[in-house]
Amino acid sequence: MLRNILLLFVVAAMAPSSVGSAQASEPIAPVGVGGTVGSISDDALMQQWSLAQDACRGNPEDETACAKRNRATAGLIARGYEQHNHDVWTSPSDAGHFDGVVQSSDDWAVNQSSLVMLMAGPAALKTLRNHLSDEKIIALWNESSDSMRHEFPRAWSILSPQMRKIEIDHKGESDVRYSLD
């Protein structure tokens, strides 16, 4: 959390005060003192971040595109979003769904056999997929797997094979967002 707040201040300080456009006619409202980005929706802000990220990545010397991306980054962080590897962003709601499935799986599995826990995996994955895209599931898993293994070992045992299933489901796509760390 502190890392996100510090990043927000650094990004906001780096961004110029005027709004430029990385993609013609797609301006981003500047980040305000409180870290809010106008009245733009989260989805619209995420889309604008993605367009600016692509423009900045394609031409890192394009200060306008990169500044626009930095302002959008600051806005997303101010709203509680977290950026993971491979440009995957998760909202507080996404993290809450993931954490809820982990906690409930661990609680449920207290008196279950290993076989029953293994059989519960597909249902837990289905619950995750009802709320989250596969790239978000993998991003949250990659960030929490080590701590989960110690804090929620039963949930880790249930979900670990399912993460490999997601990876296998996307194997032919050569998309790094679906890679386990």
Image: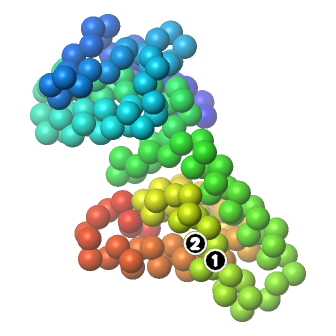
Give percent across and percent down for residue 40.
43, 24
Query: Residue reaching furthest right?
Result: 111
Between 1 and 69, the one nearer to me in the picture: 69
- Horizontal relation, residue 107 to residue 21: left or right: right
Q: Quadrant of the C terminus?
A: bottom left
Q: Residue at x 45, y 73 (%)?
A: 166
- The quadrant in which the N terminus is found is top right
Mark 2 Cα-neighbour bin, 10 Å: few <14, some 14–19, many ≥20: few
Asked if residue 65 is positioned above or below residue 84 in the image, the reply reads above
Q: Can residue 96 be seen?
A: yes
Q: Is residue 94 above or below residue 32?
A: below
- Badge 2 amino acid: Lys
Query: Which residue in the rendered view is the most extreme toward the bottom?
Result: 115
Residue 65: image tag = none
User: Is residue 165 placed above or below 132 in the rendered structure?
Assistant: below
- Residue wearing tag 1: 123
Q: On the picture, is 148 further left or further right than 179?
A: right
Q: CA distance from mark 2 to mark 1?
A: 5 Å
Of residues 50 and 154, which is closer to you in this image?
50
Relative placement, left or right, of 25 versus 83 is: left
Q: Residue at x 21, y 40 (%)?
A: 54
Secondary structure under the numbered disc 1 in the rendered image: helix
- The image shows residue 16, relative to residue 151, as above or below, that is above
- Secondary structure beneath dot 2 equals helix
Q: Residue at x 58, y 72 (%)?
A: 126
Residue contact between numbered discs 2 and 1, judged by CB atoms under 8 Å: yes
How far across and down, in percent of the image, does residue 46 sit?
38, 37
Q: Which mark is residue 126?
A: 2
Q: Position of residue 170 (x, y in %)?
A: 35, 73
